[in-house]
Image (cartoon, helix red, strand yellow):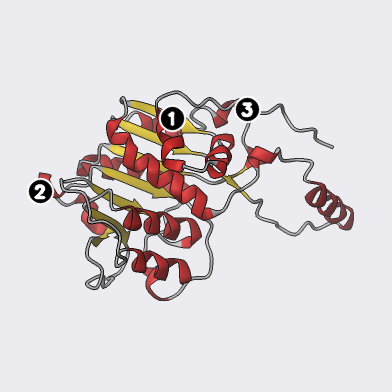
């Protein structure tokens, strides 16, 4: 629960006051290491007057001004125009053992993406960032730069002014192979890292969260578009000294990351 506690403390720090205005952001998927880190970045960044989070059970946030729990059941209810979130992030993350307040957060499944995105659009959300970790070896290079499946195409057709799919590289699940020789081969490959290019290797959740939060913050000033962030770009952002400047350059088309040549498969 350390990441969640850090996120909650972030809103109570001595950071500059939140910007004036009506900008609001909603996070769907604040459970898990990545989701908690995204929530922490949004709270600490102070770019939004209000940070909302989707919950599946009551969550007391009275001690944290600026954080508003939104029950999943409330997505279908009418919302006053001045209270609608203009930006939302959907964060898909691996399931991990959780307890306490983190249990209250919605943990979306990839199959729920079209319906969840549709509910957000009907609510009035205009900008959407979808963070979709994946095992880098499982996704062809061409699809890292484009829409990977029919669900993503359906989301793109919903009419968001800004839509971003982040394909953040994720460490393989590490399922235990049933055959001794296969386990040996997996061990050798894991040691030599032959199957995954350096820029496809996973980066820390905090770095992915910083990039996602910057995208959510800066999209309001960008031309309307559907964008895909390949894992190579996430890796480049993680190495940047100034992620905010890197994000601005990428949105403006000043950062171009070429996909590496296919890795040698043994």
Q: CA distance from mark 3 to mark 1?
A: 18 Å
Q: Residues within 10 Å of mark 1 (few under 14, many from 20)?
A: few
Q: Which residue is mark 1?
A: 249
The label nearer to you, 3 versus 1, is: 1
What residue appears at the point 59 percent right and 49 percent down from the top-left corner? 203
Mark linked to residue 80:
2
Q: Which residue is mark 3?
A: 259
Element marked by disc 3: loop
Is residue 145 shown to the viewer in this render?
yes
Element marked by disc 2: loop
Find residue 58 and report its horizontal and vertical position in percent.
27, 71
What residue appears at the point 51 percent right and 43 percent down from the top-left corner? 241
Name the image quarter holding residue 232: top right
Going from N to C along the chain, the mark reached first, 2 or 1, is 2
Image-based side of 209 in relation to 160, left or right: right
What residue appears at the point 63 percent right and 31 percent down from the top-left corner? 140
Going from N to C along the chain, the mark reached first, 3 or 1, is 1
Nearest the eye: 192 or 139: 192
Q: CA distance from mark 2 to mark 1?
A: 35 Å
Image-based side of 16 in relation to 93, left or right: left
Image-based side of 147 in relation to 124, left or right: right
Is residue 151 shown to the viewer in this render?
no
Q: Looking at the figure, which quarter contains the C terminus?
A: top right
What residue appears at the point 71 percent right and 40 percent down from the top-left corner? 196
Q: Residues within 10 Å of mark 3 (few under 14, many from 20)?
A: some
Mark linked to residue 11:
none
Nearest the eye: 129 or 210: 210
The label nearer to you, 3 versus 2, is: 3
Element marked by disc 1: helix
Name the image quarter holding residue 55: bottom left
Find residue 223 and report its horizontal and vertical position in percent.
31, 25
């Amino acid at each position: 629960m350390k990441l969640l506690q850090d996120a909650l403390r972030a809103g109570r720090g001595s950071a500059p006051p939140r910007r004036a205005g009506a900008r609001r952001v909603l996070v769907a998927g604040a459970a898990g290491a990545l989701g908690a880190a995204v929530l922490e970045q949004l709270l600490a960044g102070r770019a939004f007057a209000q940070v909302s989070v989707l919950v599946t059970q009551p969550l007391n946030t009275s001690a944290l001004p600026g954080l508003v729990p939104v029950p999943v059941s409330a997505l279908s209810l009418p919302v006053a125009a001045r209270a609608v979130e203009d930006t939302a992030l959907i964060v898909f993350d691996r399931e991990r053992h959780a307890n306490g307040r983190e249990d209250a957060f919605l943990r979306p499944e990839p199959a729920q993406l079209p319906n969840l995105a549709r509910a957000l659009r009907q609510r009035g959300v205009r900008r959407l960032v979808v963070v979709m970790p994946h095992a880098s070896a499982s996704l062809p290079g061409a699809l890292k730069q484009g829409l990977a499946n029919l669900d993503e195409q359906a989301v793109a057709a919903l009419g968001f002014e800004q839509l971003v799919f982040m394909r953040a590289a994720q460490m393989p699940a590490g399922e235990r192979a049933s055959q001794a020789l296969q386990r040996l081969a997996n061990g050798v490959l894991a040691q030599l890292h032959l199957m995954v290019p350096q820029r496809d290797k996973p980066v820390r959740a905090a770095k992915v969260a910083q990039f996602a939060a910057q995208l959510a913050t800066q999209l309001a000033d960008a031309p309307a578009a559907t964008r895909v962030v390949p894992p190579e770009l996430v890796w480049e952002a993680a190495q940047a000294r100034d992620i905010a400047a890197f994000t601005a350059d990428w949105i403006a088309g000043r950062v171009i990351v070429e996909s590496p040549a296919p890795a040698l498969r043994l």
